[in-house]
Image: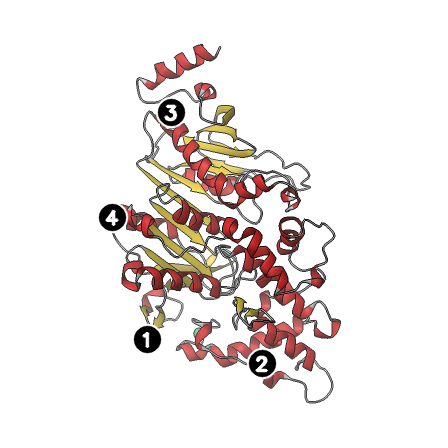
Amino acid sequence: MLTILAFAANLAMTDGLASCEGLQALSLPDTTILSAALVPEGPFTPPARTGAAATPRPFTVPAACRVVGRIAPAIGFEVWMPAANWNGKFQAVGGGGFAGVISYGAMATALARGYATASTDTGHSTPGGSWALGHPELVTDFAYRAIHEMTVTAKAVVAAFYGNGPRLSYFVGCSTGGRQGLMEAQRFPHDYDGIVAGAPTNFWTHLMAGTLSPAAATLKDPASYLPAGKLSLLNKAALAACDARDGTADGLIENPRACAFDPGTLVCSGADSESCLTPPQLEAARKIYAPAVNPRTKQEIFPGMPPGSELTWTAVAGGPQPFSIPVEFYKYFVHADPNWDWKTIDFDKDVAAADEKLAALMNATDPNLAAFRSRGGKLIIYHGWNDQLIQAGNSINYYNSVSKTMGAKETDDFARLFMVPGMLHCAGGPGPNTFDALSALEQWVEKGTKPASMVASHSTTGTVDRTRPLCPYPQVAAYKGSGSIDDAANFVCAVK
Ligand SMILES: [Ca+2]
């Protein structure tokens, strides 16, 4: 049977396109092809996830060859290839959180643009982080190995199907996907010609403490809790102090780091009320704005939440429990103790334990991208200033570390960071948050056109009500002084 299939594949290969089903016979190192079949154009409903309550929503796909496989030990992957009108390129898409799923939505977007695409569950399929307990090999796969193995395998599948491999390869991801993209640039610089890394979790071991720090400020002592009304109070005060300072009173803080907002004026002079903060609430707010620091060395662990982001603090500080990912990380990756109580977190010892055990594996903080630059690689990083899960300053810190290592001019020639005022984690928020980083990257890689800016739009109930350029750091969007502040044409990118 295998011989017949291989024969059929070879026959089809003579005119450049193998049969999709024939790919079941493909032999690749450490790889099992579980299925290979054509999916017709139209809605595709992904398989339901084990243990998940929600029914998967369908995605619209063009006719494509879908290859499902596994790379040892347990790296699940899928490769989808347009049955017609392939653009000759490959685009891998990243995952989120602890991954564990195939990113069908992002793959559908890549397919719609003519790309052959791939995604991996990164080596496990159970939700959360418990799979890491007693399985260091799975941690390694999640950390960096799965994306690289998927990349090598997917390129081979693409070559087998079309008769030639992709002429260019891109990686697009946000959050964990952003970390995956930076990890590829650092560890496997030859895998991709261009990488979009959004809101990267690249300083993973410190991010986990940085995400628990706001919870420690508000959830340990009920007196320190910041209810929604108090966050709104803080937000109004931050905007009053910082919004107009950037030249445009538009409800957005273009560069939160340029405004030293202190909430001290909000402290109650008498009894607690909706319009003031009690002293413990003030202290909690100050802790959340400030970087998480090591209590012994006073060294910064992770940046603080910027002014303007207050309404989103509920995600990590709203309780009653903190964000689950860092809690599960300390339980299953660091302490191997499912009963570990997050309230016992020690921002000295626990951060050190995480670093010792996992920094070299999981962090993608290497500032030396020389090999990626030398092969012609281009990198776009973006981060929403109002990111509720990853304090945005981390992306500036990483970009600055690359600039310092490789030179500011040299870095600007192949890697650019776009901070997005008022955008939440990867998308959404009060600021213009819809933009096409991949098109900017394609122009850079394929035409040599550096992204001088990217126009972002904001919509309300489906209608665009504001556009604004996103600018390569350290530039920000500056109002020209006339015309609508909702029109990107009336702004220029400038260092302010
Ligand atoms: Ca403003």
* The C terminus - image quarter: bottom left
Confirm or deny contact between disc 3 and disc 4 (CB under 8 A): no
Residue identifier under label 1:
482
Q: Position of residue 88 (x, y in %)?
A: 32, 34
Residue identifier under label 2:
263
In the image, residue 372 above or below residue 208: above
Residue identifier under label 4:
447
Q: Which element type, helix, strand or loop, lies under badge 3?
A: helix
Q: Position of residue 426 (x, y in %)?
A: 49, 55
> Which quadrant of the render holds ligand 1?
bottom left
1 or 4: mark nearer the eye? 4
Q: Earlier in the sequence, mark 1 or mark 2?
A: 2
Q: Which element type, helix, strand or loop, lies under badge 1?
A: loop
Q: CA distance from mark 1 to mark 2?
A: 33 Å
Q: Is mark 1 within 8 Å of ligand 1?
A: no
Q: Residue furthest bottom?
A: 269
Confirm or deny contact between disc 3 and disc 1 (CB under 8 A): no
Residue identifier under label 3:
160
